Amino acid sequence: MSALTIYSDKDVSQPTWHSTDAGEIQQQLNAKGVRFERWQADHDLGADPTPEAVIDAYQHAIDRLVAEKGYQSWDVISLRADNPNKQALREKFLSEHTHGEDEVRFFVEGAGLFCLHIGDEVYQVLCEKNDLISVPAGTPHWFDMGSEPNFTAIRIFDNPEGWIAQFTGDAIADGYPRLA
């Protein structure tokens, strides 16, 4: 179940807001310029789908975003618990960073935790199958796939180079809850 938990960026001991209601999550995030929508990831992709199969199944959704926002490229990120590089990948994404473009993800399987550092708050968004999130360019954030990753998401980019991060060097991510 998708969830949003908001914390102060100075006190992780007590959340200031929490909900699993998609409408409430969307309202909170939209107010901060973050796009959050529930789409339908309704294609059976099998146990370990190829990127081509994922793109083929959801080309209609990609085309809709491309027409709306002019995105230039897309790919698929899919990680499973048996990936030998899972720990190194988790550590890379757990460091707070920004992008020069929006970070758009449509989860078609599994779950991941986006943590957005906006102003003096941290928004932890548990994204699951059917969730579309678009983190605005320049927003400090990190992503946790958990110790046993199991997700597939379509990544959509403004530039043809794909995922390019500028790491902030801030250790804020170390103080906040992570996925198990």
Image (cartoon, helix red, strand yellow):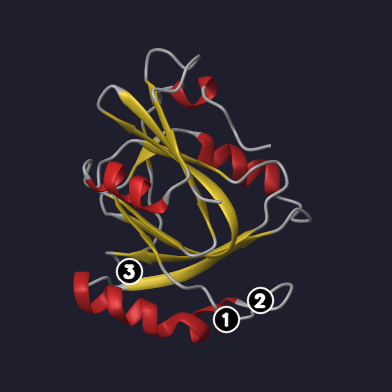
Instruction: Give the distance between the C-alpha atoms of the residues marked 3 and 2, in whole angstroms.
Output: 23 Å
Disc 3 residue type (three-letter):
Pro
Point out residue 127 in the picture as x, y percentages from the top left corner: 49, 51
**Foreground residue among 20 and 77:** 20
Horizontal relation, residue 59 to residue 108: left or right:
left
Disc 1 residue type (three-letter):
His
Residue at 60 percent across and 46 percent down: it is: 145
Disc 2 residue type (three-letter):
Pro
Asked whether disc 3 touches disc 2, contact meaning CB atoms under 8 Å apart, the reply is no
Q: Secondary structure at mark 2?
A: loop
**Foreground residue among 43 and 154:** 43
Asked whether disc 3 touches disc 1, contact meaning CB atoms under 8 Å apart, the reply is no
Instruction: Give the distance between the C-alpha atoms of the residues marked 3 and 1, in whole angstroms.
Output: 27 Å
Q: Dividing the image into 4 quarters, which one contains the C terminus?
A: top right
Where 17 falls versus 71 (above or below)? above
Point out residue 69 in the picture as x, y percentages from the top left corner: 21, 69
* N-term mark: 3 or 1: 1
Horizontal relation, residue 54 to residue 66: left or right:
right
- Please give the residue where the numbered disc 2 appears in the rendered image: 49
Q: Give the number of the mark in front: 3 or 2.
A: 2
